[in-house]
Image (tube, rainbow, N blue to C red):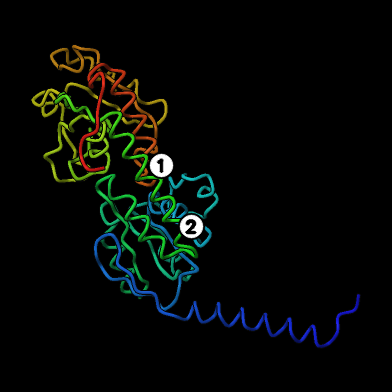
Amino acid sequence: MTKSPGWCAAALAVLAIVVSAVTDALADPLVLNDDTGQRVTLTHAPLRIVSLAPGGAEMLFAAGAGERLVATVNFSDEPAAARRVPRIGDVTAIDMERLVALHPDVVVAWPGGGNPAQLQRITQLGIPIYRQQVNRLADLPASLRRLGALGANPAVAEQVADTLQKELARIAREYGAGNGKHPTVLLEVWNRPIYTVGGTHLMSDALTLCGARNVFGDLRELGPVIDTEAVIARNPDIIVAAAPPGEGASWLAQWRRFGSLAAVRNGRLIPFEDQRLSRLGPSVVPATEALCKALAASGSLAEAPVSRGSY
């Protein structure tokens, strides 16, 4: 059927209105606060986003802004769609020329583990930086809601945030160890030299949610280097090798030489190779539950844990 000239004109008019509305929305400046409380001002709603951390990339997808992600860094493998996003380096070193060539509207960075010099250079280039970082699992939902402002539909972030809150509450009820039994844990995240996590790291908070205590929780560094003598002095009840796939058993074999350690003496050496625990995105929640199950299976946690804390 042939369309009349009047019909075509009407269709073009509607299209013009839609295009004008989209253009106006993009033209409006976007002002928001990031996870550190710093104000971020964008000239328009972002269509091109670069993430400088795997956790940031995962958070963007969860917040409904994944389709706007034009580049990220190595190890950005959650969710599966993130693996198709081009890489421009890693957390500590990115290709600045490629970053500039991408013309990002905003860069999402992890201030706790990024390269300060590179962040300063990005600022000097006039590219807005959104700093995404949480130190407690309970802060993940709010962080996700804030990040949702960079997506086309903040309701997506709201829905995922609600789900995360419910999951955290359930894990706390099941593994909160309300009987006062809180075993100390060495969470080994690298073996040569030995790296662990300090008390402000999200993985340390994961131990707390499981009803355990980070034996190096008093350290303020996110990823401090420690030595064998320090571990022997603190004598953790459990040693968890949060290792790359296939590496956990060999890491733990090194500790078996120290029979005086309570963890060795009681056979509480746990290989834990779920990489989601270190990605610092929403998938850290199911990874935390897997960690809780592993700790419970070692016999160190309460038999019938109950809720504890404010998750």
Relative horizontal placement of residue 192, taking residue 100 as reference (left or right): left
Mark earlier in primary sequence (1, 2): 2
Q: Which type of secondary structure does the marked residue at label 1 adopt? A: loop
The image shows residue 285 at horizontal and vertical percentages of: 36, 39
Q: Which residue is mark 1?
A: 283
Q: Amino acid at mark 1?
A: Ser
Disc marking residue 46? none
Task: Give the alpha-carbon distance from disc 1 to disc 2, as whole Å.
Answer: 15 Å
- Residue at screen point 42% across, 29% down: 245
Q: Which mark is residue 64?
A: 2
Q: To which quarter of the image does residue 276 belong?
A: top left
Whether residue 195 is situated above or below residue 56 in the rendered picture: above
* Left or right side of 214 for 156: right
Q: Dividing the picture into quarters, in which one does residue 215 lie?
A: top left
Q: Where is residue 252 shown, x and y percent of the image?
A: 28, 21
Give, as a three-letter code, the residue at label 2.
Gly
